[in-house]
Image: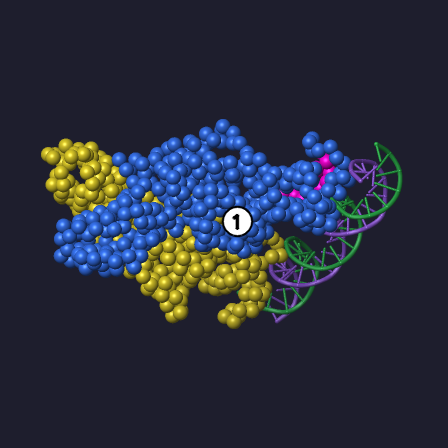
Chain colours: A yellow, B blue, C purple, D green
Amino acid sequence: MELDARKMQILQAIIDDYIMTAAPVGSRTIAKRADIFLSPATIRNEMADLEEMGFLEQPHTSAGRIPSDKAYRLYVNSIMQRAKLTDAEVRYIRDHYSKRLDEVDEVVKQTAWVLSSVTKYTAMVLAPQLHTIKLKYIHLVPIAEDKALAIIVTDTGMTRDSVIRIPRGMSPDALERLGKAMSARFQNCRLDEITLAEFNALSGEVAAEREFLDGMLRSVQRSMAKDGRSVELSGATNILNYPEYNDRDRARALLTAIEERDVLYKMLSEATNVEFSVRIGNENEDESMQDCSVVTATYKIGKNPIGSFGVIGPTRMDYARVLAMMGQIGRSLSEVLTNMFEEERN
Amino acid sequence: MELDARKMQILQAIIDDYIMTAAPVGSRTIAKRADIFLSPATIRNEMADLEEMGFLEQPHTSAGRIPSDKAYRLYVNSIMQRAKLTDAEVRYIRDHYSKRLDEVDEVVKQTAWVLSSVTKYTAMVLAPQLHTIKLKYIHLVPIAEDKALAIIVTDTGMTRDSVIRIPRGMSPDALERLGKAMSARFQNCRLDEITLAEFNALSGEVAAEREFLDGMLRSVQRSMAKDGRSVELSGATNILNYPEYNDRDRARALLTAIEERDVLYKMLSEATNVEFSVRIGNENEDESMQDCSVVTATYKIGKNPIGSFGVIGPTRMDYARVLAMMGQIGRSLSEVLTNMFEEERN
DNA sequence: GTTTAGCACTCGATTACGGCGAGTGCTAAC
DNA sequence: GTTAGCACTCGCCGTAATCGAGTGCTAAAC
């Protein structure tokens, strides 16, 4: 059997309707649409075909049809046309990024909030993966007899610092020399890719302090990696507004999975490579997510994709709108973060 | 009418039973208990009295009785005896604090997790209120031409740092002198109590840089206060396990309030003064919390109460056990944090 | 005076049932 | 290929009947 244009049109109509109402769609409903000039009976025949092809499902005889995961996949890939946000919506999003946000975690929180408030789904934002960023130089500054501050400057112009312990009696000069040597050796390396092996290749004064430097680097890496593991959440309870989660146990299962964050972290960090990703129902690896859809997008600092964000909602998600909104939010978010670090560079 | 010993005993029996089963308690159930030698009819009479006195409520005629908020209050104040944890429970809690936890926020997260896993209620932990801590000294260290690091050392021996911008051309010496002057002036002041007014009283070189110093202090205060506003949550979905939240709208209302965090922050920060606090049902200020109970306790660094934590559960909470557990967790938590900062002092 | 057995009564929960209506699949006519 | 007609299915909803846990009251027993 072939999926001709008419079948497509009918399928689209069914999906559109189901996205709005969450109720099984009958042939009459479709026949009444202004853009469809067929009788209910004809539609019924087509629907039977579509069901046979796996695009529709019937909760029970004598109910209408609902789209299957496969139908949504087709919809996202071929039928759906990119939605355009209204001016008001674009303004709403922009406005929420125009106020003073001067810390990364504020921006992340704000993004989660805007995303959930605008989509009415559950929003999640993976914090910037700063540990994957490239090193420009390390600055070691003594602050007490046995303590120093390691200041990392990245190639995006961002700085991060971390208090470290130094061997007693190490002079400020020695510390500075060590910093310079480290900078020279590891410039343009990704922070998380500097390994112990590379320390062993060092020589001279630097080699002698290998142990100290390694410990220092670990502590810097650890503190940056930890930030990067955090997933900001907003609107988790939004899912309770959708009838598909009227069932207490279903709702609990999903909410619990969301609360754990591990699954979310996994999904978001895997999605940091692809600009947009849509996972529908059973396409999700994690079992607890197999009856909902997850849409993710990435954001950047400068030109580097540095993190991702997404929404979780029922499979009958309004994909076109969500993707449009996430595009807009991604742009705003990238812009704010990029400015933030550009500014820091000066 | 008087609340004699027998009435007390019956009330306690009803509360005990209701805490376990969440079902209205009938006279027969109580009469069958091994420690009560009265017939159902007698119990019924007593129950009618207790209802008249406001300790019991009847969901409808011909159902059993359930304890009122007033009954729980009496129970917590007078009837309940402090529960003793089993060795296994104490060990469980201790074990979860014995592993390496070297950042404040890890300890906070761990506490929330342990508390919810041990009580099966929703747990919340207010991060240490570091901004209320007393200043020992400020160290200003230049790290770039127009940037310096402000390092705050508190009287608990803890350090915190924050990157600040400095006027171009300020010499390292000047910076050091300013740090010294600030330290001398504000030693032993609470960080959050240093106000603009006090700057105006300064003189000499320090006065000239008043604006810069004020800006710096604000930024340090802001960054510390922000940490202190964070409320860590764990087990939010636990409430879905209690039949009182079978109702979808009730569950959503509470979960939404919990997700907002504002209410939780308010409750926890108010509770930072009292070692233990129990708020039952309508004793809670916030409307969304009026059908549940909130138990909080404080934790310390050294001798200073520095934060609080608590659980949210149905009013038929097992108060005795919860209080015992929170006592134990409070001790472990205080110990870990105190060690952490004692160690930092060396 | 207190306690208890007995009993009529209340009321939510559960089950059973019939009608309604949305929707289908099939057949036959166009 | 399309459509009107029709018998049929099945979940939903409202009503009625039944059940049972639990009560309050009365009167007798202690």
Taking the image as shown, residue B256 lies to the left or right of residue A274, namely right
Three-letter amino acid code at the position of disc 1:
Ala
**Vertical arrangement, residue A228 with respect to residue A18, above or below:** above
Q: Position of residue B248 (x, y in %)?
A: 57, 53
Instruction: Label 1: state its secondary structure.
Output: helix
Which residue was labeled with disc 1?
Answer: A251
The magenta span reads: B21-32
Q: Residue at x 49, y 28 (%)?
A: B87
**Vertical arrangement, residue C3 with respect to residue A66, above or below:** above
Q: Chain of mark 1?
A: A
**Quadrant position of residue A297:** bottom left
Mark 1, other Cα within 10 Å: few <14 / some 14–19 / many ≥20 = many
Q: Is residue A203 magenta?
A: no
The quadrant of the image that shows the C terminus of chain A is bottom left
Total labels: the figure holds 1
Q: Position of residue A71 (x, y in %)?
A: 47, 55
Q: Position of residue A283 (x, y in %)?
A: 43, 48
Taking the image as shown, residue D29 lies to the left or right of residue A73, namely right
Taking the image as drawn, is residue A161 in sight? Answer: yes
As rendered, which of B168 and A155 lies closer to the eye? B168
Q: Residue at x 47, y 53 (%)?
A: B263
Q: Position of residue B68 (x, y in %)?
A: 63, 47
